Image (tube, rainbow, N blue to C red):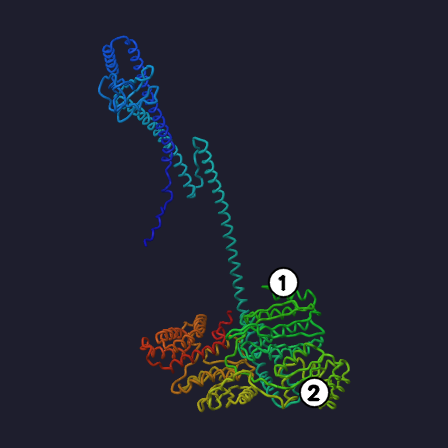
Amino acid sequence: MTVPKPPVQDPDPANRAASLRALIFRLTLGPALILALVLGGLLTQQQVSDRRQLLLSHGHASAEQLAELIELSDGEPLEKRLNWLHKSLLALMLEKDMVRSVHIYSATGDNLDPDTGLRELASAGPRPRTPVRAEHLAGQSEGFMLEKSGSIQVLHPLKTKPLSCWISIELHRPYFTIGAYQVALAGLLGLILCSLAALTWSIFLSERLGRYLAHMGKAVEDIGHGQLDQRVAPGENRELNVLAEQINRMASNFASYQEDATANLLQSMEDLRQSLDSMEEQNIELDLARKQALEASRVKSTFLANTSHEIRTPLNGIIGFTHLLLKTEVDELQQDYLQTILRSSENLLTTINDILDFSRIESGNLVLDHIPLNLGQLLEETLQILAPFAHESRVELVPLIDGQLPATLIGDPLRIKQVLTNLVGNAVRSSADGNIPVRASVQSGQDAEIMVRISVTDLGNRINEEGRKELRQVLESTAQSPGQQISSNGLGLAIARSLVERMRGSIGIDEAAGGGATFWVHIPLQLERNRSQPVRDQFPGSRLLIADPNRMTRMQVSQLLQQWQVETIELDDTSTFLPALQQMWNHDALPDAVIIDTAIAGEDFCGFVGTIQQLVDTYQCRVIIQGSPVELRRCYEQLRTRVLTFLAKPVTRDNLLRAMRRSLPHQASSRPTGTTHPALPWTSPPRVLAVDDHEANRHLVGELLRALGIDVTVAASGEQAISLCERESFDMIFMDIQMPGMNGIEATQKIRAAETDARVPIIALTAHAGAEEKARLLSAGLDDYLSKPVSEAQLSNMIKRWMKILVPSRGAQLQQDMPRLVDISESLELSNNDATLARDMLQMLVKGLIADEQELNRCRAAGNHRDLFELVHRLHGGCCYCGVPRLREATGALQEHLRPLQNRNDADLDEQKVEAVAQEIRALREWASEQDLDTLFGLAASV
C-alpha cells in the first residue's frame, strides 16, 4: 500500500501572497474587459438583428411591387403576364446585388411538386440551396426568414385572396456573414483600445502606490531594527495618511517604552546585585546553621541510640527472666506481681520506642519491623496495661477477638501496640461508667496477606463536641495548619494515623449509638509461612456457670469458653444466683465450675465473701473469681484457701485457659487445630553459639535456646567466639554487635574469612533498631538480625526459618562452600552500587517467582522440555542481575542440562536438578515474605 506523501509546505508564506501590482491589474483590467465584452456582444447582436429586419423589409417591399404588377396585368393574356413577371423578377435580382435568386410559389392548383407540395409560378436565378416546402409555409401569414443548410431565404406572402402565393428571395450567405464579421471586428478593436487604456492607468496607479508603500515598509523595517527616530512621510490620500500617522505613533511609543525599560533594567540590575550580596550572606549563615543542625542531629541520634542500647540491654534481661519465672510454679498473687513487672517493662520499652519514633519521624527515618506477632495477645496486653487507668473511671475494657484470626502474623508489634495504646487511651479519656469494647477481626484475606480490622468504641460522655470535632479533623485533614493548636489526645491520634499509614493501612471514625464514636483501623499483615498449627485445648462435656451483671464481659468469657467446647450458663441477676444454684443442687446438675465477678458484691464485700464460702462449703463448687486487680486484692486473703484461682480483668485467653486447667484438670484434652506440620528435619539438636558481653543477656539467650531443645554454647567476647569456631562447628551463631574490644561485625568478618565448609548463618543481636544499622549489618556479611529485647518466640521463629532453609540442602553441599540465599553486597555490586536499582531488580525477580514456580511444575508434569528450557533460561538471566547466588547456580545447572534436550521430550530429565530449582524458589519466596527490602538496601530513610 502506497503511503501518500504529505504536501510540501512553502517555507515562506509571503511568497504565496499576490503582489500589489497584480492586485491593481486584477481590479482595473478585469472590470474593463468584462464591460467591453458585454458591450461588444450587445452591439453585434443588435447589428445582426437590424440586418435581419432590413432583409424582411426588403422582401416585404418586393412582394408588394410584384403584387401590384400582377394586379395591373390582370386583363392581359397569360403569356404576356408571365413574361412581364419574369422580367420583373430579373430586374429585382439585378437591382439588389445581395439577391441570389427569386422564386414565386403557389400552394394551390394542379401540377404541385410531390416533393415540396408547391407549384413554382416564376423564378429568376439558380434553384435555392434549400427547397421551400409546403410545411414551411403552413400556418404563416406574415413574412419570415428561413435559414437552413447554408441557405438564407426571405419568404413573404403576395396579397391575394385567398392567400396562396409566396415570393422567395434567396440571399447570398457571404453578404450576411461579412456584415456580421464587420460588426465583430469593430467590437474587438473597441475592446483592445479599452484594455490598453485600463492597463496604462493600472500601471500608473501601481507604480505610484508601490513606491509609497516601499518607502513606508523601509521606515517600518528601520523602526524594527531599533532606529526609533525614523518617521514615515505623509501620503497623498487620507487612508495612507492615517496609516503613516499610526506607524509614527507606534515608533514614538516604542521609543518611550525603550527608555522606561532601560531605566527599569538598570534599577533591576542594581537590586539584583544587592540581592545576590544578601543571598550570599544568607547562604553562608544557612550553611553554618545546616552544619550545626546536622551536628546536633548526629549528636541527638547518637545519644538516642546509645541511650536505647543502654536501656534495652538490662531491659532484655528483665523481660526475659520474667517470662521464664512465669513458667515456674507461683501463686496467683505472685503471678499478678510478675505480670505487672512484665507489663511495666514492656510499657517502658514502648516508651523508648516512642522516643525513637519521634526522632525517626522528624528525620524521615522511621522503619517498620517485620517479625512474628500474636495480634490477639498483643491487644490483650495493651488492655491490661491501660486497665488500671480505665478502672479509675469505672470503665471496663473488653477484648473481643475473632476466632478466625491467625495466631501468628508478620508485622511490627511495637507500632501496632502504640496505635492501640493511643486509640484505647483516647477512648478511656472520653468515657465513664460503662464498657469499651475493643474488637479484632479479619476483614479480608489473600494468599499471603490478610486485612485486619481493629475497632475501639467509646461512650463519649466525658468529651464535648469541640474535642470530638478536633479528633475528627486530625483523622480527616490532609495536612495540619502551621498555627493550629492540638491537644494531647489529638497528638496521640495524629501519631497513630502516621504509623497506620506507614503500615499501608487506613484509620477512620464512625458515629456510634448513644453519642459515642468508633475508631477503627485497617492494617494489612502477612501470614507467617513457617508457622506450625497451634494446639487448642478442649474441655468437652464441661459445664460452667458465669455470674456477671455486665453483659459484655459475660459475653466475652462465654465466647472464649465455647471455643473450648465448654457449655456455659449465664446469670445476670445476682439476686437469683443462690436460688438457681440451690435448684441445680436439688436436681444434681451442678456445674463443673463457677466464675463469679466481684461486681455482684457491690459495696458489701463481707456478704460476697460469705457467699463464696457457702458455695465452697455447702455446694462443693470449684470457684473462679474475676474482677479488677484492686477488687481481687480486697478478697484475696479471705478466700485464697477456698478459691481455685483469681482471674484479673480484662480477662485474657491465656489467663482464662490457666484457670480452666486448674478447675477442670481431668477433663482437659488437647488437639491440634488443623493438620500438623512435620518436625524440622534435623536428626540431632542444632548446635548454636550465642555471643554477648552482657552476662544477664548471655544467660537469658542460653536459657531460652535450651528451652527450645537447642544445644547452646555461649561466648562473652568476639575473640572467644572466633576461638570456639576454630575448634568446633556450629549450625547457627547469634552475635551481639556492640561489644568491647572486637565488636560483632569484626568477629563476623573473621569467621567468614576462616570458613572452609558450608556457610554458617550469623544472626545479629542488636539494640540499635535504625534502618542504617540494619542495612550496614546485612551488607557486612550477617544473614539476619533481631532487635533487643529478644523473646522466646522470636528466637524460635528465627531458628526454624534458617534451619528449614539450610538442613535439606546441607547434605549435598558438604564438599563445597554454601553460597548465601541472598547476598546484598553482590546485588549492590551488580547494580554499580545503586541501591534503588538493586532493590527494584530484586523486587521484580521475587514478584514473578509464584508464576515461575507454577510454570515450572506445569512443564515438568507435561514433559515439555523446550518450554522448560525457555523458562529456566529466562529465570537464570534474571538471577544474573540480582544477588541470589544459590538460585542462580541451580538454574544455571538445570539450563545446561536441558540445552541438548530441548527437542527431545522423551529424554530422561534429571529430577534432582529440577527439584533443586523449585526448592530454591520456595526458599527465596519465604525469605522475601519476611523481609523489608527498603531496610535491607538502606532506602527506608528516603521513603
Q: Is the residue under label 1 in contact with that under label 2 (CB below 8 Å)?
A: no
- Image coords of residue 209 (percent x, y): 39, 33
Quadrant containing the N terminus is: bottom left
Real-space CA distance between mark 2 and mark 1, rounded to the nearest whole angstrom: 69 Å
Kind of residue at disc 2: Ala
Q: What residue is pinned by disc 2?
A: 589
Q: Is residue 344 visible?
A: no
Label 1 Cα neighbours within 10 Å, binned few <14 / some 14-19 / many ≥20: few
Locate residue 781 relative to residue 451 in the image: left or right: left
- Image coords of residue 547 (percent x, y): 71, 82
Q: Which residue is nearer to you in this view: 748 or 587? A: 587
The mark that comes first in sequence, 2 or 1, is 1
Q: Which residue is nearer to you in this view: 6 or 546? A: 546
287, above or below 638, in the image: above
Q: Residue furthest front?
A: 110
Callout count:
2
Q: What residue is pinned by disc 1?
A: 483
Nearer to us: label 2 or label 1: 2
Locate residue 32 relative to residue 546 in the image: left or right: left
Q: Quadrant of residue 162?
A: top left
Q: Is residue 512 visible?
A: yes
Circle 1 sits in a helix, a strand or a loop, which is it?
loop
Q: Which residue is nearer to you in this view: 571 or 244? A: 571
316, above or below 132, in the image: below
Circle 2 sits in a helix, a strand or a loop, which is it?
loop
179, above or below 461, in the image: above
